[in-house]
Image (cartoon, helix red, strand yellow):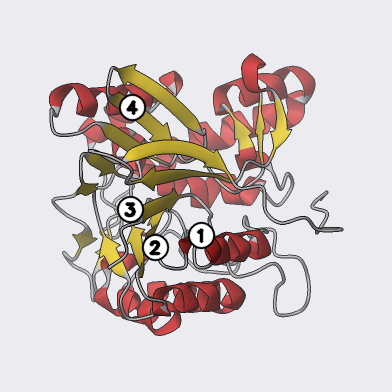
Amino acid sequence: MSSHKVKVVVSDFHLGAGHRMSDGSINILEDFFHDREFIEFIEHYSHGAYENSDVELILNGDFFNLLMIDYDEVDPDVITELIALRRMTRIMDGHKAVMNALRYFQSLPGKSLTMIMGNHDPGILFPSVQALIRSYVGDAVKFILESYEFDGVYIEHGNQYEIANSFDRRQYFLTKNLPQPVINQPWGTLFLVHVVNRIKRRKRHFDKVLPFGTYLKWLLIYDLRFGLGVVYQIISFFFRSRFRNDPRRKNSLRQTLKILIEAPLFPDLDEAAERILYTRDDIHTVIFGHNHRPTFRQIAPGKEYVNTGTWNEMTNLEVDRIGSRLLCTFALIEYLGRKPQVSLKVWRGRPKLHSEADVA
């Protein structure tokens, strides 16, 4: 058994059906364009200094994007077992090199893979979807549906701390008056599928600008017609979706009011991390993803919060982070002393002469 033990955590890759559609056209619903960089990342923690190490790769939610694969789907927000299997198959086939790298990683001594569910990949709730993933990446992969705790470290995707994106953990599936179970999707999923993904046809990077409230104000000042159209779509969809009677989509007045109260606030995950760290004496580090904001904060002596961000290029409108950038951030957990040490790193990759230009 190796005495060197590490864990690496990434999140929010949003793998879709691949860079190209079957007809060769660009897939504008694809968010992940860094397969090669991630494969190099996996290889780095497989060989060299880590060849004889125990390494656990933790994919902390939204690794897959099951919320829309193409624009021609009927009721794209409805996910049954068969739909989840079909979408997941297209994702795995669209990123075969990544799946092969994960399979190879797991085949090595001391290497293991853990997948945590996020709000974009709830298909792993189905055992058959888990079996499909194992057929591509290896039988030993471990699935976590909620939180993952070990050695004072608490890892969770983070969507449960936003009312619009939180699942009802008491009822993951809707079955009443339905021929087959349907995943009980949060309202944020409906909004993403029916509003955001449609707007992406006109502005491909619409969902890659933070914070959204600032971006919306910017649109209303500098692109009034488009901005008013976005506001209209948001308001009309809210009432259309919240007050329709459909057994495949669960609605409640109480949740609607909570969404209305919280939506203008754009809550951060820092407060959720603080609550866990202050109320759990056995937890010294909280790791989230979800909000695409890489973060490292010392909450109190011996208490730290890490957000692993995303490997998608983002545009930030906040003064201290303004600009577009790609930061391939990850959390590195090293067992060096009495307790694991956690740090936030940026993967720079290997030197290369050129890469794909994403300028659409």
Secondary structure of residue under mark 4: strand
Q: Is residue 52 above or below residue 3?
A: below
Seen from the viewer's position, the closer of residues 138 and 66 is: 138
Q: Which residue position holds label 2? A: 53
**Quick check: marks 4 and 2 in contact, CB under 8 Å?**
no
Residue 240 placement (x, y as % from top left): 42, 42
- Which quarter of the figure is the N terminus placed in? bottom left
Q: Which residue position holds label 4? A: 304
Q: CA distance from mark 4 to mark 1?
A: 27 Å
Q: How packed is label 3: few (under 14 Cα within 10 Å), some, or many (20 or more)? A: many
**Quick check: marks 2 and 3 in contact, CB under 8 Å?**
no
Q: Is residue 53 visible?
A: yes
Q: Is residue 61 visible?
A: no
Seen from the viewer's position, the closer of residues 9 and 90 is: 9
Of the two numbered discs 4 and 3 on the same chain, state the one appearing first in sequence. 3
Seen from the viewer's position, the closer of residues 44 and 198 is: 44
Q: Which residue position holds label 3? A: 185
Q: Going 57% across and 59% down the picture, which residue do you hit?
A: 41
